[in-house]
Image (spheres, rainbow, N blue to C red):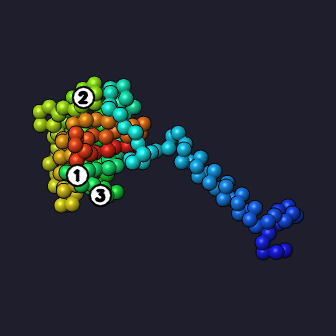
């Protein structure tokens, strides 16, 4: 048998035909996985629109996980060891876990997705932790409180300041 062919059920198949078929099958399988309707989109590919009460319904009373944080215009790395979550409740209530403490608060949302943070915006428990986790918590809570609009995509919500210098993006 030549090294340029393969045997398949007793028949010789040219190597180029076999490799081309294998590459086409792999591409087809990978493209099918990437376009699956239930697949989670990446932050860069998400299409956000202003949040409405109806659009937020699938995100209510579910722990959402912080996936992207921008504080004062700087992208902040998110360590896997300190997940940050948020839960959107009825009546504009929020609660969650930052890198060290639990937080809670309320917001008011206008029909166009504009946010208003009444009172002190966020309350926090007062536990101490490692300095890097406390720094992350400070950047997170500052960015969340600085947000002025709430946006929604199919699998995520984003709190964002008008100038985009503060972003807290959460996914299901």
Which residue is outermost to the right? 10
Residue at 55% of width from left, 42% of height from top?
Answer: 36
Quarter of the image with the N terminus is: bottom right
- SS class of the residue under badge 1? loop
In the image, 63 versus 15, the foreground residue is 15
Residue that numbered label 2 is attached to: 109
Residue 65, image x, y percentages: 34, 45
Q: Residue 77 carries which label?
A: 3
Residue 168 disc label? none
Residue 120 visible to the viewer: yes
Q: Mark 1 points at which residue?
A: 73
Q: In this view, does 106 lie to the left or right of 57?
A: left
Pointer 3 or 2: first along the chain = 3
Q: Is label 1 or label 3 in front?
A: 1
Q: Distance between the residues labelled 1 and 3?
A: 13 Å
CA gap between label 3 and label 2 equals 28 Å
Residue 166 image point, x, y percent: 23, 46
Which residue lies at the image location 28% right of the left edge and 35% below the top edge?
A: 150
Quarter occupied by the C terminus: top left
Q: Which residue is drawn at 37% across and 29% down?
A: 55
Q: Position of residue 159 (x, y in %)?
A: 27, 40
Q: Which of marks 2 and 1 is nearer the N terminus?
A: 1
């Amino acid at each position: 048998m030549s090294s340029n062919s393969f045997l398949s059920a007793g028949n010789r198949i040219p190597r180029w035909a076999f490799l081309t078929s294998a590459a086409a099958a792999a591409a087809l399988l990978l493209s099918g996985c990437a376009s699956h309707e239930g697949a989670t989109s990446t932050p860069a590919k998400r299409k956000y629109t202003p949040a409405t009460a109806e659009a937020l319904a699938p995100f209510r009373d579910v722990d959402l996980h912080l996936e992207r944080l921008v504080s004062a215009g700087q992208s902040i790395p998110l360590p896997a060891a300190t997940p940050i979550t948020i839960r959107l409740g009825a009546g504009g209530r929020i609660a969650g876990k930052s890198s060290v403490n639990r937080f809670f608060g309320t917001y008011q949302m206008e029909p166009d997705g504009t946010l208003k943070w009444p009172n002190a915006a966020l309350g926090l428990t007062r536990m101490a932790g490692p300095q890097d986790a406390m720094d992350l918590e400070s950047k997170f809570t500052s960015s969340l409180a600085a947000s002025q609009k709430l946006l929604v995509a199919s699998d995520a919500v984003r709190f964002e300041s008008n100038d985009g210098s503060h972003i807290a993006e959460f996914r299901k």
